[in-house]
Each structure stands twice: as C-alpha cells, then as structure tokens.
Amino acid sequence: MAGPEGLERARREMEKHRLDALVASSLTNVSYISGTGFFTQVTHPDRLAFVVITRKQAPVFILCGIEEAQARAESWIEGIRPYVEFAESPIAVLAEELRTLGVSEGRIGVEKRHLAVTDWEPLTTALAQAELTAGDVLFDRMRSIKTLQEIELIAEASLATDAAIRSGFASARPGTTERELGEVMVAQCKSRGGEAVQHLVLASGTNGFKVHASPVDKPLQTGDVVRTDFGMTWGRYHSDLARTAFVGRVSRQQDRVYRQLERVHQAVIASMRPGVPCNEVYRLCGRLFEESGLRYDMPHVGHSIGIGTHELPMLHPYDESLLAPGMVLMVEPLIRAGDGLYHTEDMVEITQDGNRIRSRSSDWSSPFVIGPH
Amino acid sequence: MAGPEGLERARREMEKHRLDALVASSLTNVSYISGTGFFTQVTHPDRLAFVVITRKQAPVFILCGIEEAQARAESWIEGIRPYVEFAESPIAVLAEELRTLGVSEGRIGVEKRHLAVTDWEPLTTALAQAELTAGDVLFDRMRSIKTLQEIELIAEASLATDAAIRSGFASARPGTTERELGEVMVAQCKSRGGEAVQHLVLASGTNGFKVHASPVDKPLQTGDVVRTDFGMTWGRYHSDLARTAFVGRVSRQQDRVYRQLERVHQAVIASMRPGVPCNEVYRLCGRLFEESGLRYDMPHVGHSIGIGTHELPMLHPYDESLLAPGMVLMVEPLIRAGDGLYHTEDMVEITQDGNRIRSRSSDWSSPFVIGPH
C-alpha cells in the first residue's frame, strides 16, 4: 500500500493522461490508495467501494456502511461517504460525489477491467456529460514500481515461504501424503509470519500434470516428482513460490531435466536489467528450453506481485514494458516432462544495474530428494 | 454443483426467457454447470472461462489451456475448447464458438453482473447481430432452489462449523487471545471436514464494533463480548455461522440483550414458510427489535448460500422473492449494543410446510460464558 504517496503517484499519472478524476474500484486499487479494503469486495462484488481522486481536492472514500468502522480505523482518508446497502445505489452515490467535486463533466478514469456491465450502464447514464475513459493503466503503472517498503515486505514473505517449503520437503518421506506435506508447509509459513493461504498447489506423480492441483490424501511414492506452487498473505501482500522435489531418489533423467530447468531459470534471470523489454525475457526463456530439447508451452514466464498475486508487468510475448528499477518479478519457468511438471519460481528485484534474487533461503541448484530418513 | 441436472434447469429457464444461448462466466456459475472451476477466475480475472449452453447441442467449455487438465479430470462436459493465454482473446473464442453453434445472431444471455466493461465492449462488436441480454437472473433462479444433495452438504458443513465454534469457546478462558481462539475453531472445523477458511471474523471488546474484524493478538478480558462470523469451504460449498459469547461472566444487561436477540431470531425463523416474501421476513425482524427497544440498522437479515457465500434470495427490504421449498437461508440478525455487536446466524431450510433449522449442534438459547475453568 502506498497511502498518501500513492495519491501523489496517482496525481502525476492523472496529469500525464489529462484526467480530472480517477476512480479506484477493485480491492487491490482501493487498498493501494486508501490503506484498507474489504474481502467482501471480492466475495460480494455488488457491494462496491470507490476511492475518488481529483487533482487538488481531498480524496473521497465511498463504501457500504457495514465497512465504515474498519475504514475509519485503518484508512488515512478522512472523507468517508458510507451508503446504505440495497437502499442506495453505489453508482448513484459515486455520480453524486463526482458532481459535488465539480468533475462530473470532466475526463474521468474508471477501472474498465473491474467494473461490471451492470454498473457501467447506469454510470454512463448518470454521467452523460463526462468523458469516461479506462483508468486501469494508471494504476498498473503506479503499482509496477514498488516502494522500498513494499520490496522489503515481499522479500521477507518470499524468503519465509522458501524456508517453509524447504522445511516441508525435509520433514516428508515416502508415504507422507500430499495433504500432510501441505499442512507442514502452511504451519511453517505461519510460524514465520504468513497469515492466510492464498494458493496451495501441491501434487505428486501423475496428479502433477494439473497446473493447479490441490493436495489430496495420496501418499508420496518413491520415484515421484513433487511440485508445489504456494503462497500466503502477509498483511495485504502475497508470497508466491514454486519448487520441485523428488521422492526417495532422483533418476538420471530427472536429474538432467531439473538441472536444465535451473540452468535456464538462472540464465533468464541474468538477462534481466533496466531497459530490457519483458517480452524479450519471455522469448529468451523459450529459446533456451528449445536449445535444451525441452518443450516450453506456458503462456508467460513470470509476473509482478504485490497486493495482487499477478501484477503488471508480466513476462509474456505481448508485454513490451521495459524493466525498471523498483520492479519486482516472480520468474517461474515450468516445463512438462514425461513424469510431471517441473517448476521453480523466484522473486527478482530489478535494481539500478541489474537484479537481485530475493527468495532463496537455501540452495536449490541440485535436485532435493525427499527422505527416506 | 448440479452437473447435468443444472443443464436441464438452465434449459427450462432459457425456454421461459426465450434464449438461444446462455453463457456462464463467473466462478460460481461455471462451477454450478460444469462441476469444476478455477480459483484463477477470481485471482486472475482476465483469465476468463465460459460454459456455453444452447437449447439442444452439447455444452462447450471454453478455458485457458493452463486449466485444461483439471477440467478434463473434473468436469462432465466433453466439449472443451482451450485457448492460449495472451495469444488468443477469450472473447473472440467465445464469439467464434457461438457462431459454430449457429446462435451468434440469436438471443444470448450473458452475466452482465460479472463481465467487465473491457470484455463487454469487444463482445458487443464481435456479436453485432446478436441480442445480448442479462442472463444472471436465470442462474440466480436455478441456484436458489437447492438439490437434496446440496441441502445435505450445506447442513453437514453448518453443523460441523457450529460444533467447531462451540469447541473453540469451550477451550478458551480469560487471557486466551483472539488469534488463539480462532486457530482452535479452524482446527476443530478441519477435523470435521472443513477445508479452507473462507472468512474468519472474530473480535472481542471494543474490536467488536468492526463488522469484519480479523482476530488479533489481544487477550479476551473478563466482561468482553466475543463475536465470531466464521465459514470454511467444503469442496466448492461454504459454511457461514455467527455466534456470540461472553468472557468470564455475563452481566444482567448482556444477558438481556442476548436473550432478546435469540428471541427475535427464533420468531423471525418461525415466520419463514413457502409463499412468504423475503422482504416481509426482513421487516418482521426490524419490527421485533424495535419493540424490544433495540436499534436495528443492518441492510439485510440473511442470504442464501451454496457455491457462493451470498446467494439469492436475500432477506432485505427490496427482495420480493417468495420463499419456496428447497431454499436455504442463512438468517443472521446482528445488533449493536453498548459493549459490542451481538450476532447469531443459522441455516434454515425451507420445507413443504415450514422450515427446519439445520445448524444447531447444541443449545445456544442461553448466553455462553467462556471460562474461567
């Protein structure tokens, strides 16, 4: 969250885009600016919340009355306008506040990637004199450069998640179930400050071909590949790391594929520095896998992270953004081998002259073998 | 999830609404029809998934290739059309499939409450000959009447959650922190089949005025009101119950307010039977609180539940739906007293001639006092 610094960033972007007002509506953008947000924005999407930013006036936070006490306790924004759910339309309240601020006939950025058609239709009617435009990209740009505090928080969460996965692998043995291993990882992560599970993909053997498989009551068997892609929340931020291990022993073929994955991963990261286009990083990854004789068919090889689990920029063929200092990229090559998916993921901070890997609490350059103890 | 039965329900609704096609896009509606869904539909909203239903042809499941293996393993739908993320537009793929099905110039219901403006704009262009209409209400109606299997699953989850909260309260004492109490409730719920925490509101003393407060490292103090509103997932379904307890002792005033809450709660439930309008139930609740001299200012007093945590109908002043057999309502009066929020919530199944409370594993008619042991 950027708080008042976020407001300044927003105003600089608004100036570039000649906007009179910018309206945050998604959980992530509302949280980024206000310092708070409500899980009901996701579970009850009709219960809209907005932060209205203008060039000079104090921001206005529109929210359902049910959330008022939390907002007053947690947000630095003083102008809070609660509405009564079902009795008042949040869209009508938004239009009214924009009128009060004198910008209802101006150029207004809204989150077109977030607002539903049922909200958009009455909004265009209520603001018939305004020029409504997509404001999403302004938030994307603000959030793509992390504050120092954000970088340290994400790095701390990443290192803790890495250590938790390592502890989980170290505690397991052939016969441990996927579910048991997952529970150790979660408990280890909690003991290091993780709060709630954001995603826990964990699969062994043939289960492993599902990209987003949940752990089940299946015992790990000697010879299995085990893959996890795991993240928890730290306040409003997320961790997200992937690791691959082998049960009981590692075959020559598994060792070869794992080391190729790791080699490509390190070479891709080594290419990342300010000025390099994101899609060039993606293409390099594909080329290196091809040269190793491995099939690479994932649509992206990484993404930024923050209040959201996937933030921009992303390392995919159509993202032409240039890497810049202060960006954080989760780099995550994943390949399909004959016996499962091999996957690794690390947090890479773009620095003035290159990058730093911020998520390795121990050495993953060789295959990790689970038990027998 | 209703699987093929859901398809039949959808077709009956489509006939009533004269639709040639109905397109599910939200996680809940995609899951309801297909039997599977992807958490990335929520965390990565750009990664769209659709189930396309026509009057006679087999349904088509459009999804990101990353999710293909899961869909093939879990869904009964055979017609799966994966798209390559970033390279293909899911909206263009949807339009193409509707053309292949011969309905691209027909009347098509889409989820206007779910589709974002950025998806809606290209969709209206790609389907310029179609009549696009809001299909949300068809799904609302299908899902409002639960199958027998759904009712039993929600009842089982509700009873387990109730027992877990009771165990948590019974294990606590003055000095136990909110966070510790929350952890016991979660562990107890998991031991009874709960999978992941959906929401865990838990607050004591003055923290209690936030409607959605998370548990913190604050010890319970003698005299505190403790309120929890807690739910976990059971497969794709949810539990959601609220309970209120008192630490160390219960004052005469606390006892009085608690018993009034419980009395109003039981009287509201007693009024619920087929044919009664939802808003009448809400109004009765407000009237009963008023007669007890208690201020009631919540915008709703209950909601259905299922794959979503809030489903329709809802018990609020503007929902005129009539209660019907097979509906499930979570009835949850909440009042603000001087020392915190008092809240209770139960699962009520509407039967042929009245209703059944399905969530009380023990007696909550008297105030529950936490320790000292």
Image (cartoon, coloured by chain):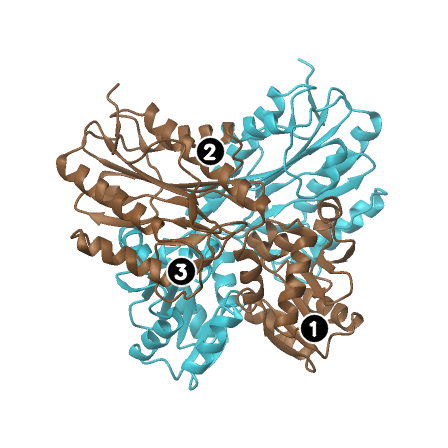
Chain colours: A cyan, B brown
Q: Which residue is pictured at 37% across the width and 74% down the height?
A: A92
Secondary structure, mark 2, is helix
Q: Which residue is mark 1?
A: B20
Sequence order check, earlier mark of 1 and 3: 1
Secondary structure, mark 1, is loop
Q: Up-down: is B151 above or below A312?
A: above
Label of residue B276 in the image: 3
Q: Nearer the viewer, mark 3 or mark 2?
A: 3
Relative placement, left or right, of A231 versus A337 is left
For the image shown, how many numbered marks are present on the structure?
A: 3
Task: Using a 10 Å C-alpha cutoff, classify the residue at mark 2 as few (fewer than 14 neighbours), some (14 to 19) or many (20 or more).
Answer: many
Find the residue positioned furthest to the top: A373
**Residue B64 point in image, percent of width and height:** 70, 55
Label of residue B160 in the image: 2
Along the line of sight, the residue nearer the viewer: B175 or A369:
B175
Along the line of sight, the residue nearer the viewer: B250 or A225:
B250
Q: Up-down: is A258 above or below A233?
A: above
**Residue B323 point in image, percent of width and height:** 45, 58
**Residue B8 point in image, percent of width and height:** 68, 59
Q: Which residue is pictured at 59% across the width and 25% down the height?
A: A180
Along the line of sight, the residue nearer the viewer: B125 or B133:
B133
From mark 1 to mark 2, how far is it between C-alphas? 42 Å
Find the residue positioned furthest to the front: B353
Amino acid type, residue under disc 3 in the picture: Val
Callout 1: residue from which chain?
B
From mark 1 to mark 3, how far is it between C-alphas? 33 Å
